[in-house]
Structures are given as structure tokens and as C-alpha cells.
Amino acid sequence: MGRRRGAATRLGAAGGLLGAGLMALACLGSADALAQAATDPNLNAQLLVGTRDNDVARVQRLLAQGAVTESRNRVGKTALLIAAEKGNPELVGVLLQAGANVNAASLSQVTPLMAASYNGATAVVRRLLAAGARTDPLDRMHKPAIVYAAGEGHADVVDALLGAGIDVNRAYEHQLTALMWAAGQGHVDAVRRLLAHGARVDLHDDRGLTALDIARQTHHEDVATLLAATH
């Protein structure tokens, strides 16, 4: 019992870090718009601010004037990463068309795909995947995009990511699978999607717990009932 209680506590703590991994980076004050590009720093800083403000016309104008797509703020976010955080598919498309690097990560190794997956921005996720976004990178919290999508319960994003070829049964830190994350956070729809894609219910994390065990210990009875029916 002590081992299982410890594992449930760890997943609960990790659940808090699920948001912290991205959201601690999401606060973008005006000072964050300091650009580090070698060309006109004013144009590049304005590009970051325009992206932060979801101002598509302004971003298009700045790009036409020579703003550099790979300009970064002080925490290493590019305009594309900021647009992905905002969940704006039109703005993401403008930046991609201008040549933005779809896989450019922040200093904390957060990619645009991770940010969009965390926020449930399905249209942005699909656009990034179509542009060649990699699904395997891990951020500084050792989590990939699929863990953020599953842990936040974004079933449509889970579908999109799995459709891009992610192994539904791959285990990440502490041998936790995407199904375990969705189960531990109580997201029934995400659990259903993962099961539909072939997620195994018999896998164990590094404490010997299955997704069903985790759902029960985190008191998500609807998820536990669903998982028990698949045994």
C-alpha cells in the first residue's frame, strides 16, 4: 500500500508540473519582446509583440519589411512558438509560410507542437504536423507533446498526434504512458481515444501500477470503470 500511495502522490505532483512545464514559460510580458537577431532589432521585437497580440496584419507587415522569423525573446521563444501558445492557426500559417522553423524550441526545450498540444489547439497541431513538426522531442520536464495532450484531456489533439505515428504505448519518465497520464488526470474522452488507438491497459509504471490502479487511487471512478471493462 505504501508503494502504491507513493506512486499516486508522485503522479499527482507530476500533474501539477504538467502545467508548470509550459505555463511557467507562458507569461510573456512586454520586456520579453527583446529580440536577439542580428538585423533590425526594432522590427524583430515588434514581430514578437505583434504575435503576442494576435495581430495577423501587423505580423504580415513586419515580415514584409524584413523582420526575422527566428527572432527570440529573452526566454528563447520564437514568434511561431508564441503563436502556437495563442492557438492561432492563421498566425501560425503566416509564420510558417514565411519560413519559420517549425521545431525551434525555447530555452526550456518547449516546441510549438508541445505548446499547441497543451492548449488543445487542434487546428494548430495539425498545421504544425503538416509542416514537419517532430513529435519526439522532450522538454526540460522530460515530457513530449502527447503527454501534454493526454494529461490535459485534449482528445482531438491525441488523435492528431497518434495519427502522426506516435507509439501509443511508449513509456516516458517513470515508465508512465499517455494512457496513465490521461487516467490519472481523469480525462475519460482522452482515455477512450487512447484505447481506440490500441493503448494497453496491462502496462506498469516504475512502481508497478497500471492505468487502472492510478485512476482508482486518484479517485476517477468513471475512468476506472472504463478501464476495468477493457480487462
Image (cartoon, rainbow, N blue to C red):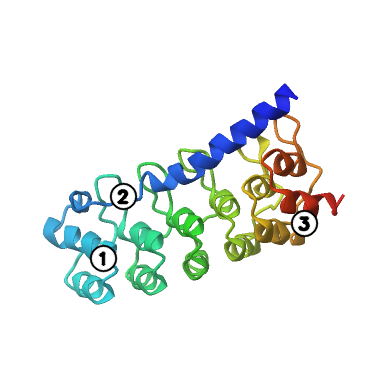
Which quarter of the figure has residue 62?
bottom left
- What's the CA distance linking mark 1 and mark 2? 13 Å
Residue under the image location 18 percent in, 49 percent down: 31
Q: Position of residue 87 (x, y in %)?
A: 41, 65
Q: Secondary structure at mark 1?
A: loop
Name the amino acid, label 3: Gly
Give the numbered dot on residue 18. none
Between discs 1 and 2, the one toward the N terminus: 2
Q: Is residue 160 above or below residue 21?
A: below
Q: Amino acid at mark 2?
A: Cys
> Which residue is denoted by mark 2 in the rendering?
27
* Residue 101 visible in the snapshot: no
- Chain-order first, disc 2 or disc 3: 2
What's the mark number on residue 53? Answer: 1
The Cα atoms of the two marked residues, 2 and 3, are separated by 37 Å
Q: Earlier in the sequence, mark 3 or mark 1?
A: 1
Q: Which residue is mark 3?
A: 198
Q: Mark 3 Cα within 10 Å, few/some/many (few <14, many 20+)?
A: few
Mark 3 secondary-structure assignment: loop
Gap between marks 3 and 1, in whole Å? 40 Å
